Image (cartoon, rainbow, N blue to C red):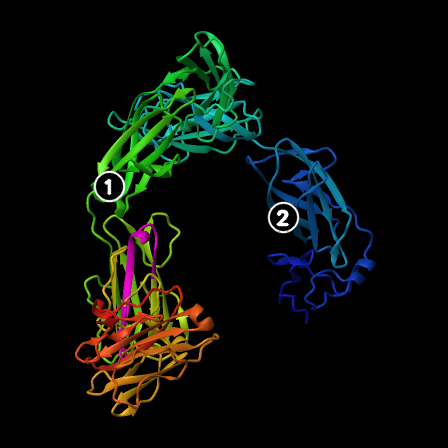
């Protein structure tokens, strides 16, 4: 059974392939009688006639071609389009009995290039299709008809003919007549009811118009009646418009060609004013002087610009005259033109020059008078004022406003001075703006503006303001413990908290938030470094996450943080650096509470806080922003801000306690000895097994001996077999280690606590032997890093 044959219908349903592509639609083709020589179509998906059928067929007679029912032959029949397109019915009629199932139409332009190709099914010997094509006015095209040869279209057409296309005129550009009583435009109310305006048909395409029909109405609907004006060859088409109502009105316009065919209607709108809303039209042209790159060439450069009422349609001629003499002219090909006017005969100083503009041939002349500086001219007037959105004494975002100069300067130079010294200068509009910073507080800020113009003597004006005291920057911070629930509507950020977390809680912080809060008027970034020049302050943060190491800023919802959320991973260390215009005037300080050490020392401006490599948790964090140079007091513990296992494990310390003896050795950063005991620390062994060559030397101050000589790595410094008391120590690195690190050390004294830090050979302990030392700590600090701060400001060596 043929799968394409419909029951009870003597036809077969075929989908026609065009060049290998399936044509949309189903085509009904008469069935071939069973007794015919052509075999039944194969149920194969290919819908093309079989090659054997083509071989058996008689030579094909050329089909007759019609376009819109008109015979198409060697002499072109002319068809009228709709303005841009020609909608036509294409038909190719074969002799009865043809076996063709489809034809291919090809439209060929006068240059021999194909314009379009489309296929059509053949039904009862006629290949018919309706197509709308973009075709040009007054152009003759050729249509070619092809049939299939095997599975492809035949290379040569079986028939062709010529046809012509005429398109009616299409109005493409309409502009207001600038010399009319009212100049009506789309976006501003002008004129009024009964106030006459005019429109100019600036451009049409396709066919040539011999007349125009137009109407004005209050809707976009097609008008019931039209007015008509004829157009003489080469003359402009001007349409008089007298509004009968205010508000939004619509101009409907269409062209008519010599055959009486009307083109498509173009609709544009304009606003008609009332006495309360109407606005005056701007000048047809504006003129300004340009910087003169060749001042001795005998010409003055002027820029003349058309009003925006013409949109993007430049037109017309401008002539410059001094008295009655023409000194320059320009034809508008762009929205603005540069004219070199003749300087001879103008004299010196300011001279009045008339710019006479004519929009089109026959239009009224419009005159604009401008003052031109020939040479040796001086500005009059001019003033400057420092402004801000708020009080200029407190708002940091300042702007200098300049006004009152005559003539209008072509450029300015802006200088900002603090107590008479220039702190910012430039000639761009951005230089009008000044971000006032903390050094300005309490001082006089002056904006000095110099105006320039072609052949003008520069003139300078100033304005000043005394800057008040602004609030200092603050920090907003907070965090989250492992195991606590995430709160979607919580910012995790507070400016009033004394700490994030609770020291001694036994819980681990997993996530930390910190944002700068500069004073009012300053803009800050919550997301780290910003390229926005308006952003005055930001933080760059990183966190050391358990099992993953150092990681940057992350986001969850609207919260930007370091660390992790919901992964049961400790935040073990962090660092915060500040940036932006405010950064040079503030330090950001921060510290961590680690159970093994207590509160660590204060880190600042990108230094590490916490520990790495030890697996210690952070239970609480504190942060502060202080004016640059403000010294933060050390933690009461006097601890270092940060301990790294890889660094501190290069050092070992073993204490000798009297009377109990040698205790287990500890590494850098840990306490060697006891801080709560009646025993005495009387000797130490200090060793360095570092990444670099070199070691450590230690000297001890022993009763009745004084300062003994330095001993090398792991040798005993002090005494452990006599009754002499040891009161102080000195330590120093050697070799490459000494070039890479500083060695810090401090002594714990019974009844006093930890003394301050000594380093690199300084004395740590007491002058008197009556004090009882009980412990010592040793820390390695990389060269160039900030020195350790001593708790309570104590000295390392107590006399």
Magenta residue check for 181: no
**Magenta part of the protein: which range?**
577-601
Count of marks overlaid on the render = 2
Q: Quadrant of the N terminus?
A: bottom right
Name the residue carrying label 2.
129
* Sequence-first tag of 2 and 1: 2
Q: Is residue 35 above or below residue 266?
A: below
Q: For residue 493, which quarter of the picture?
A: bottom left
Q: Answer few, some or many: residues within 10 Å of disc 1's Cα (few below 14, many 20 plus, some between 14 and 19).
A: few
Q: Nearer the viewer, residue 565 or 760?
A: 760
Name the residue carrying label 1.
389
Q: Nearer the viewer, residue 575 or 400?
A: 575
Q: Quadrant of the C terminus?
A: bottom left
**Which secondary structure, mark 1?**
loop
Left or right of 457? Residue 392 is left
Left or right of 573? Residue 394 is left
What residue occupies the far top of the structure in this picture?
Answer: 324
Magenta residue check for 597: yes
Q: For residue 167, which quarter of the picture?
A: top right
Q: Which mark is residue 430?
A: none
């Amino acid at each position: 059974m043929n799968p394409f044959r419909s029951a009870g219908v003597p036809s077969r349903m075929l989908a026609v392939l065009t060049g290998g592509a399936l044509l949309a639609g189903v085509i009904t083709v008469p069935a071939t009688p069973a007794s015919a020589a052509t075999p039944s179509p194969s149920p194969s998906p290919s819908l093309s006639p079989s090659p054997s059928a083509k071989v058996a067929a008689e030579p094909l007679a050329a089909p007759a071609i019609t376009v819109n029912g008109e015979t198409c032959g060697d002499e072109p029949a002319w068809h009228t389009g709709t303005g841009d397109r020609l909608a036509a019915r294409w038909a190719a009629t074969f002799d009865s009995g043809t076996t063709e199932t489809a034809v291919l139409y090809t439209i060929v332009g006068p240059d021999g290039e194909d314009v379009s190709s489309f296929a059509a099914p053949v039904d009862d010997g006629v290949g018919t299709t309706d197509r709308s094509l973009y075709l040009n006015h007054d152009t003759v095209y050729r249509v070619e008809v092809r049939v299939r040869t095997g599975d492809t279209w035949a290379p040569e057409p079986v028939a062709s003919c010529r046809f012509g296309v005429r398109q009616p005129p299409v109005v493409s550009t309409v502009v207001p007549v600038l010399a009319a009583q009212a100049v009506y435009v789309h976006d501003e109310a002008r004129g009024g009811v009964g106030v006459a305006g005019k429109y100019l048909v600036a451009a049409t395409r396709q066919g040539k118009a011999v007349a125009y029909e137009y109407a004005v109405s209050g809707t976009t609907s097609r008008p019931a009646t039209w007015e008509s004006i004829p157009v003489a060859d080469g003359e402009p088409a001007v349409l008089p418009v007298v509004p009968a109502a205010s508000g939004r009105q619509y101009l409907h316009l269409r062209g008519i060609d010599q055959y009486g065919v009307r083109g498509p209607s173009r609709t544009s709108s304009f606003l008609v004013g009332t006495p309360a809303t109407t606005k005056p039209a701007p000048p047809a042209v504006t003129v300004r002087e340009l910087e003169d790159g060749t001042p001795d060439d005998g010409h003055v450069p002027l820029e003349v610009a058309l009003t925006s009422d013409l949109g993007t349609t430049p037109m017309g001629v401008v002539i410059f005259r001094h008295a009655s003499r023409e000194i320059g002219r320009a034809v508008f090909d762009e929205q603005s033109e540069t004219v070199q006017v003749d300087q001879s005969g103008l004299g010196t100083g300011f001279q009045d020059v008339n710019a006479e503009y004519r929009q089109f041939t026959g239009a009224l002349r419009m005159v604009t008078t401008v003052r031109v500086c020939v040479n040796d001219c001086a500005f009059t007037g001019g003033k400057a004022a420092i402004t801000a959105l708020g009080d200029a004494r407190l708002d940091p975002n300042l702007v200098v406003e300049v006004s009152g100069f005559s003539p209008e300067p072509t450029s300015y130079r802006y200088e900002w001075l603090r107590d008479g010294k220039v702190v910012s200068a430039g000639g761009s509009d951005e230089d009008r703006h000044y971000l006032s910073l903390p050094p300005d507080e309490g001082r006089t800020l002056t904006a000095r503006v110099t105006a320039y113009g072609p052949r003008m003597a520069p003139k300078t004006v100033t304005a000043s303001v005394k800057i008040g005291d602004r609030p200092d920057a603050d920090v907003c911070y907070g965090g989250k413990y492992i195991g606590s629930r995430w709160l979607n509507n919580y910012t995790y950020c507070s400016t009033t908290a004394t700490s994030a977390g609770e020291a001694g809680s036994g819980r681990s912080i997993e996530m930390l938030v910190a944002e700068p809060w500069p004073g009012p008027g300053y803009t800050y970034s919550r997301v780290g470094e910003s390229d926005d020049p308006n952003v005055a302050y930001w933080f760059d943060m990183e966190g050391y996450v358990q099992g993953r190491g150092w990681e940057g800023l992350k986001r969850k919802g609207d919260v930007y943080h370091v660390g992790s959320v919901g992964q049961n991973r400790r935040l073990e260390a962090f660092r915060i650096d500040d940036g932006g215009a405010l950064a040079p005037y503030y330090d950001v300080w921060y510290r961590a509470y680690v159970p093994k050490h207590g509160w660590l020392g204060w880190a600042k401006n990108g230094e590490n806080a916490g520990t790495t490599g030890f697996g210690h948790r952070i239970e609480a964090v504190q942060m502060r922003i202080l004016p640059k140079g403000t010294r933060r007091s050390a933690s009461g513990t006097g601890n270092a801000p940060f301990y790294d296992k890889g660094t501190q494990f290069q050092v070992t310390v073993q204490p000798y306690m009297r009377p109990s003896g040698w205790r287990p050795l500890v590494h850098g950063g840990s306490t060697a000895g006891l801080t709560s005991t009646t025993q005495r620390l009387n000797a130490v062994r200090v060793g360095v097994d570092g990444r670099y060559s070199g070691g450590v030397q230690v000297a001890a101050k022993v009763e009745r001996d004084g300062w003994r000589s330095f001993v090398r790595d792991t040798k005993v410094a002090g005494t452990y077999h006599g009754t002499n008391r040891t009161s102080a120590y000195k330590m120093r690195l050697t070799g490459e280690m000494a070039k890479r690190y500083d060695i810090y050390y401090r002594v714990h004294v019974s009844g006093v606590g930890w003394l301050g830090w000594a380093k690199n050979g300084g004395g740590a302990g007491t002058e008197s032997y009556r004090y009882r030392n009980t412990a010592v700590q040793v820390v390695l600090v990389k060269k160039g890093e900030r020195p350790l701060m001593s708790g309570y400001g104590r000295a390392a060596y107590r006399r």
